[in-house]
Image: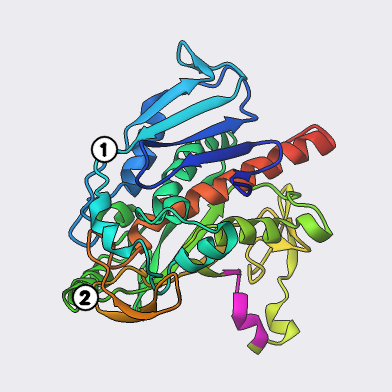
Amino acid sequence: MSGSSFGKLFRVTTFGESHGSAIGAIVEGVSPNIALNESDIQKELDRRRPGQSSITTQRKESDTIEILSGVFEGKTTGAPIGLLIRNSDAKSTDYSKLKDVFRPGHADFTFYMKYGLRDWRGGGRSSGRETAMRVAAGAIAKKILSHHHVQIVAYTLAVAGIYAKKFDLTAIESNAVRCPDPDQAKLMIEKIEETRRNLDSLGGIVEAVVVGCPAGLGDPVFDKLSARLAAALMSIGTIKGVEIGEGFKVAQMRGSENNDIFYHDGQKIRTKTNHAGGILGGISTGEDIILRVAVKPASSIAQEQPTVDVSGNPTTVKVTGRHDPCICPRVVPVVEAMIALTILDCLLIQKAVNGSW
């Protein structure tokens, strides 16, 4: 299957299926002599793993990471890093009744049309379980970026029209929905639990901020940083939209309102506002990169829905098993990972261009 690799100089290839024996990744482009162990990766995976709370899927996977290669005596060797997570709680029988029908909102139909067959056990490669390896690879990228004072933080901005009103970043990991506003988080959780009782699901918005990204990343025309970030984030199955800076609001603004005015601040040139979200002409400005993604409602719901089978015959489907009523809390670390992979790759390209970070 093509399309399983991401990046140019910092390159990640993932493999494995949701209900296979394991999922894994090969990470290339990691410099030697970087301190790295399983705990560096595990702490990020623990943020994404299933079964974290009552508002996430109750599939019990520890998502224990194994480093198979590329690390010796606690340091990277410069060789490809092999990563593996063994699946331990896949219940394929939950999907046996779905093997010949197309679930609404899922990739069942499109996979079948592309390949002439599909892995009906939890969606195979189209399952959100694949994103665990993105988070694992992203953990390596985040550690390297931290050495260069680049930090990435994402959080749930909104669920079902309930928006965060306060932004206490220390509160993100203290509530089940990963919202920076504890009061609004309670309302979000109540709405998610109510929706789950009604056998339905909810979507939301995840916002991310990149702090410390230097100016000059990204290339004009086809490899704009904004284009690469959008592609990276849209490759996450549940994401249906991306906006950077003011995003779609710019359609209602005047140029005099939207333009960010430059000024000299000590040794740096900065902007008084950041409507552009840290990117101009597809190249980073040095200001915070701010973006948001639209997260669709989980497609697996227990309501009976009309559909067709593989022969085109009308039927109905009710998706049983263990599923997330809202994907926002668990997609937060995935969003951070894809941003980290993109930023680090662009940093390495920039280093090749002018010899500096």
Q: Is residue 175 visible?
A: no
For label 1, the residue is 88
In the rendered image, the quadrant that contains the C terminus is top right
Q: How many marks?
A: 2
Q: Residue at x 20, y 55 (%)?
A: 53
- Colouring of the image: rainbow
In three-dimensional space, the C-alpha distance between marks 1 and 2, rounded to whole angstroms, equals: 26 Å
Q: Residue at x 51, y 26 (%)?
A: 82
Question: Looking at the rendering, which quadrant does residue 354 occupy?
Answer: top right
Residue type at the position of mark 2: Leu
For label 2, the residue is 199
Considering depth in this image, is 293 or 50 the residue closer to the camera? 50
Question: Looking at the rendering, which quadrant does residue 246 occupy?
Answer: bottom right
User: Can residue 243 be found in the magenta stretch?
Assistant: yes
Residue type at the position of mark 1: Ser
Q: Residue at x 34, y 46 (%)?
A: 19
Considering depth in this image, is 127 or 72 the residue closer to the camera? 127
Q: Which residues are magenta?
A: 242-251
Whole-percent x, y for residue 224 in the image: 75, 57
Whole-percent x, y for residue 247 in the image: 61, 75
Determine crowd level at label 1: few under 14, some 14-19, many 20+ residues with C-alpha closer than 10 A. Answer: some
Whole-percent x, y for residue 266 in the image: 71, 50
